[in-house]
Image: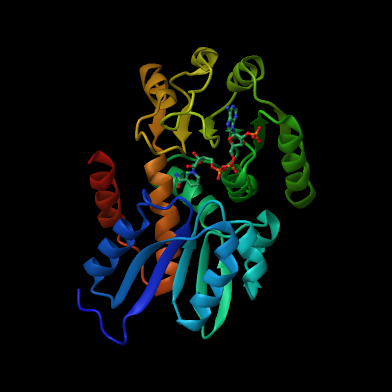
Amino acid sequence: MIISGKTRVCGVIGDPIEHTLSPIMHNAAFNYLGLDFVFFAFNVKTDDLGNAIRGVRGLHFHGLNVTMPHKNAVVNYLDELDPIVKFLGSANTILNKEGALLGFNTDGIGATKALEENNIEMSEKKVVLLGAGGAAKAIAFSLAEEVADLVILNRTVEKAKALAEALSGIFGNKFNGDRLSSEVLTRNLVDSDILINATSLGMKQKPSLNLAVLQGLTSKLTVMDIVYHPIETKLLKDAKAAGSKVISGVEMLIFQAAASFEIWTGFSAPVQVMRKAALNALSR
Ligand code: NAP
């Protein structure tokens, strides 16, 4: 890689940021396609977000990924928002287009692409989505048009109900919000096609989903966990043992990154290269 005065600079901001896989995936993709781009990671504290975005403008950075805890607050510093960003109130991708900062959110498309590319039909299916946080909201919005029935289950039931109601206002009445409990989950899994865990349960150092889920896992179900560290969560292990088709969170990670890459470069993302880079880093 030769860095010159013409090299376009991209990066990711977040706190913490040490474990991000974004530089690994994007630099591998830029190198593979021979693009004159480079990608860095920056630790930005909450109080410094405004300064960081002024830096993006002043230093003419070309593109940015935004991760926790800045996805919501960053929206206030942008010039134009994609419709999905307006609905979610959060952005994970910024394009600097001739000085105007445009905000996008690729989390939802990352999840639906992960399903699509793994040959999972979403059209007219019943989906159970666990969680009503930032990622769950983005996924729900991306799934909303296609699926027949979307049940959102969350520990804080008010958030699940509010999300279902907001989606019903836009897409019609096929959304339900309820409490995340073994009983509600097991009841809903009986006639579901796809289960997506978009809570942080199952992450390293966090508890796993309740064992009672096991009862609802069958061979007709596809189970996607958006948690990617560990690559194979307990939920995915249990689902595999029950004969369900499983999709790991790495797939969503790759496809949300691929969508950002395409926004910045205008080129189709080399998904296999990005997958290999991410899996290599995760297995280290
Ligand atoms: P978030 O906005 O903080 O939402 C967290 C969600 O997890 C909420 O629904 C929360 O429920 C639920 N939760 C947390 N602890 C829980 C517990 N002990 N019991 C039950 N529910 C619990 O976070 P996020 O940004 O949506 O991210 C969620 C997960 O997705 C994280 O692990 C993140 O790393 C992962 N993620 C993966 C990708 C990818 O590309 N694969 C992309 C984005 C995020 P309450 O509302 O009740 O608090």
All told, the count of numbered labels is 0
Does 245 sit above or below residue 13?
above
Q: Nearer the viewer, residue 137 or 63?
A: 63
On the question of residue 17 being in view, the answer is: yes
Q: Nearer the viewer, residue 121 or 171?
A: 171
On the question of residue 266 being in view, the answer is: no
Residue 5 on image: x %, y %: 30, 87
Residue 15 on image: x %, y %: 48, 53
Please identify the quarter of the rendering in which residue 119 is found.
top left
Q: Nearer the viewer, residue 49 or 4?
A: 49
Q: Residue at x 52, y 35 (%)?
A: 200
Q: Residue at x 29, y 42 (%)?
A: 282
> In the rendered view of the protein, which quadrant contains the N terminus?
bottom left
Quadrant of ligand 1: it is top right
Please identify the quarter of the rendering in which residue 228 is found.
top left
Type of colouring: rainbow
Residue 74 on image: x %, y %: 60, 63
Q: Residue at x 45, y 50 (%)?
A: 16
> In the rendered view of the protein, which quadrant contains the C terminus?
top left
Residue 212 on image: x %, y %: 54, 13
Q: Nearer the viewer, residue 243 or 59?
A: 59
Does 278 sit above or below residue 248?
below
Q: Is residue 102 left or right of residue 59?
A: right
Q: Is residue 85 left or right of residue 243?
A: right
Q: Residue at x 51, y 64 (%)?
A: 93
